[in-house]
Amino acid sequence: MPTWETVCELGAELPEVEIGTWYGTPALKVRGKGFARLRDDGALVVMVDVIEREALMQSEPETFYVTPHYEDYPAMLIDLGRIGPQELRERLIESWCRKAPKRLVAEFEANYP
């Protein structure tokens, strides 16, 4: 089962990621912009395309979900107890890409295995 430490390890694979806080909780940031944070209830908040979010929530509603607070925002919650490391990596990469500068994303995509 992934933990916050797993999230940090996977996040460290991405360029210019720093560990900090966001809304008073542990977070990953790229150039000062938060792209993942651990909520007090243990859920992980990540940035996501709203259409993709809907598909993920329909396919795995116990893993991917939103609260009313996030309904109108391009973010979703992940139950870390229900996600595998590879899927978590993909969600973190997507979230990072949504917040990182375009040039940094292009460099990453050109070099990502």
Image: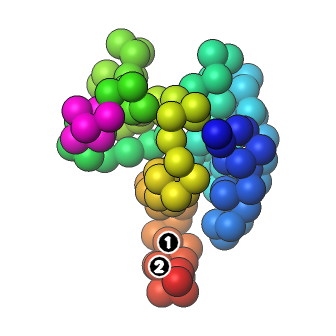
- The label shown at residue 109 is 2
Work out whether residue 39 or residue 59 is closer to the camera in this orientation and state it: 59
Q: Which residues are magenta?
A: 55-60
Q: Amino acid at mark 1?
A: Val
Compared across the picture, whether 5 is left or right of 2 comes to right
* Residue 49 painted magenta: no
The residue under the point 57% across, 53% down is 85
Residue 32 to residue 62: above or below = below
Q: Characterize the local packing of mark 2: few (<14), some (14-19) or many (20 or more) Cα atoms within 10 angstroms.
A: few
The residue under the point 48% across, 86% down is 110
The residue under the point 29% across, 40% down is 56
Picture coordinates of residue 95 (x, y %)?
48, 51
Q: Characterize the local packing of mark 1: few (<14), some (14-19) or many (20 or more) Cα atoms within 10 angstroms.
A: some
Q: Is residue 52 visible?
A: yes
- The label shown at residue 11 is none
Picture coordinates of residue 88 (x, y %)?
53, 50
How far apart in space, not on screen, are marks 1 and 2 (Cα)?
6 Å
The residue under the point 71% across, 48% down is 6
Task: Look at mark 1 in the image and give the residue it sits on.
Answer: 105
Residue 98 to residue 48: above or below = below
Q: Amino acid at mark 2?
A: Glu
Tag 1–tag 2 contact (CB < 8 Å): yes
